[in-house]
Image: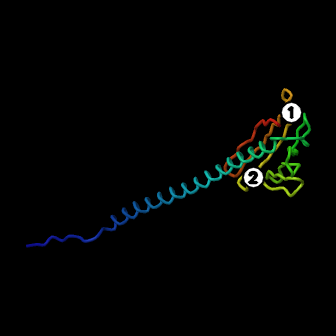
Amino acid sequence: MRKAHHSQGFSLLEVLIYSGIITGFITFTILSAYQMIEYSGRLEKQRELNENQRFLVQKLHWALSSVQTVNNPALGGTGATLSVNKIGFGSNPIVIDAVNGAVRMSLGGGAPVALTNRYASTTNLLFDYQNFYGEGIMKVTADLSNDVATTSINTNIFVR
């Protein structure tokens, strides 16, 4: 009686095939994880840019409410700096400008404080003060950007 000889283990060809399949799976998994991490970072920077834009518009609305005097720009003029005096506000004037990509605000001639963070660089900040049917209106334009996104501010705010 002859005993059948059964091989135990894998042949070299089987080992190479399984190694290739496992290597492909690991490579795909690592690339997918890297793309998700990169996308998450890009999404975070886009979100921060949009939050900077919203915060800046809110501060501009605040600065242009209850205004006693617009110091700069003059009515009918434009400028890169906004200066206003608010009614009953003890830290007049309020000055908003952009320096080195950061929008800043100073109160009562004090040191300016950045309104935008490191995720947003601001260019082309412009204040255009016009008369609109007997009321003052400030048109504010600016471009905000970072290394992954760009957005703009283009708003009209009644000066009251």
Mark nearer the N terminus (1 vs 2): 2
Q: Please, is residue 94 above or below residue 33 in the view?
A: above
Residue 84 circle label: none
The N terminus is located in which quarter? Answer: bottom left
Dot 2 alpha-carbon crowd within 10 angstroms: few under 14, some 14 to 19, many 20 or more: many
Element carrying mark 1: strand
Query: Seen from this angle, which residue lies furthest left?
Result: 1
Image coordinates for residue 50, horizontal then vertical, percent: 67, 47
The C terminus is located in which quarter? Answer: top right
On the rendered structure, is 121 left or right of 33? Answer: right
Image coordinates for residue 28, horizontal then vertical, percent: 47, 57
Image coordinates for residue 37, horizontal then vertical, percent: 56, 57
For the residue pair 102 and 106, the one nearer the viewer reads as 106
Image coordinates for residue 21, horizontal then vertical, percent: 39, 60
Element carrying mark 2: loop
For the residue pair 2 and 139, the one nearer the viewer reads as 139
For the residue pair 10 and 78, the one nearer the viewer reads as 78
Indicate the amino acid at tag 2. Answer: Thr
Q: Which residue is mark 1?
A: 130
On the rendered structure, is 43 left or right of 1? Answer: right
On the rendered structure, is 32 left or right of 127? Answer: left
Query: Seen from this angle, which residue lies furthest front?
Result: 88
Name the residue located 74 percent from the left edge and 45 percent from the top edge.
58
Dot 1 alpha-carbon crowd within 10 angstroms: few under 14, some 14 to 19, many 20 or more: many
Q: Quadrant of residue 10?
A: bottom left
Q: Are marks 1 and 2 in contact (CB under 8 Å)?
A: no
Indicate the amino acid at tag 1. Answer: Gln
Name the residue located 65 percent from the left edge and 52 percent from the top edge.
45
Gap in Å between the C-alphas at discs 1 and 2? Answer: 26 Å
Name the residue located 54 percent from the left edge and 58 percent from the top edge.
34
Q: Which residue is mark 2?
A: 116
